[in-house]
Amino acid sequence: MQKGAASAPPRDCPRCPRLVELRLSLRTEHPDWFNAPVPSFGSADARLAIVGLAPGLNGANRTGRPFTGDYAGDLLYATLLRLGLAEGAYRARPDDGLRLSRCLITNAVRCLPPANKPTPTEITACRRFLTAQFDELPRLRVLLALGRIAHDSVIRSFGGKLRDYPFAHGAEHALPGGLHLFDSYHCSRYNTNTGRLTEAMFVDVMTAARDRALA
């Protein structure tokens, strides 16, 4: 999709020194990887926006497309295809021709954080891009947060207080402007391997978010 400048950090975004240091180190170690803030992926007429945590080392940071190239993407894109929110075939690379339909995927933090753990300062610094992304989706009706960090950043992007919107898998929250937020545990390999999140649980919450978005 065509991205607005406000929602897309520059390739050499300087806002988070720790993330910049990691990015430059990986550019030396893996010069053929993307190694930059990962842009959103999806449809400009999206009714559903899915918000993840941050790019994974061997996933989006390597490929340049959210959730592409790691286990979380295998589950997420298979579910989107199953629910009619994507077209084509997911082959874990950005040139596979996969297209999203009425859906967009982004992250609360656009750069790879060490150990996949962004600091509160980094999350806050990147929130301007998340808020701008929402503003660029005129048909947006529903957000799906994958994990607590994504949930908290979405709530704060709308000026809400976290105590008024407790995170819980499968929870639905009414947001200002008539929008709705659904919560899910993150579709990471750790969560699925430990049984915290099953494929059926994930499909159920994704289905509820889709149905609300397209109603």
Image (cartoon, rainbow, N blue to C red):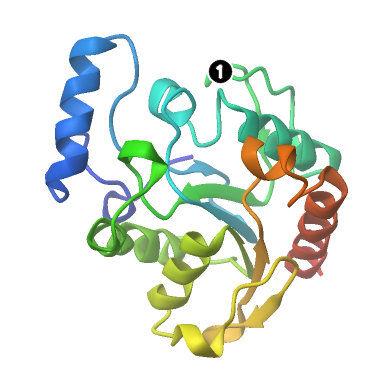
Structural crowding at the residue carrying mark 1, measured as other residues with C-alpha within 10 Å and reported as few (<14), some (14–19) or many (≥20): some
Amino acid carrying label 1: it is Arg
Q: Residue 36: percent from the left, percent from the top?
A: 28, 31
Left/right placement of residue 97 relative to residue 107 reads right
Residue 14: give x, y in percent of width and height.
Answer: 12, 44
User: Eyeballing the image, is 80 above or below 15?
Assistant: above
Residue that badge 1 annotates: 93
Q: Is residue 145 left or right of residue 90?
A: left
Q: Is residue 90 left or right of residue 110?
A: right
Residue drawn at (41%, 27%), measured in percent from left and top? 57
Q: Is residue 16 above or below residue 49?
A: above
Seen from the viewer's position, the closer of residues 134 and 60 is 60
Q: Position of residue 95 (x, y in %)?
A: 54, 16
- Residue 141 lies, in percent from the top left, at 64, 70
User: Residue sitting at 60 percent across and 73 percent down?
Assistant: 167
Where disc 1 sits, the SS reads loop
Furthest residue toward front: 194
Task: Reply above or below: 182 against 83.
Answer: below
The residue that appears at 41% across and 21% down in the rendered structure is: 62
163 and 60: which one is in front?
Answer: 163
Locate the C terminus and report the quarter of the image it occupies: bottom right
**Residue 136: quarter of image:** bottom left
For image coordinates 63% across by 33% down, the residue present is: 73
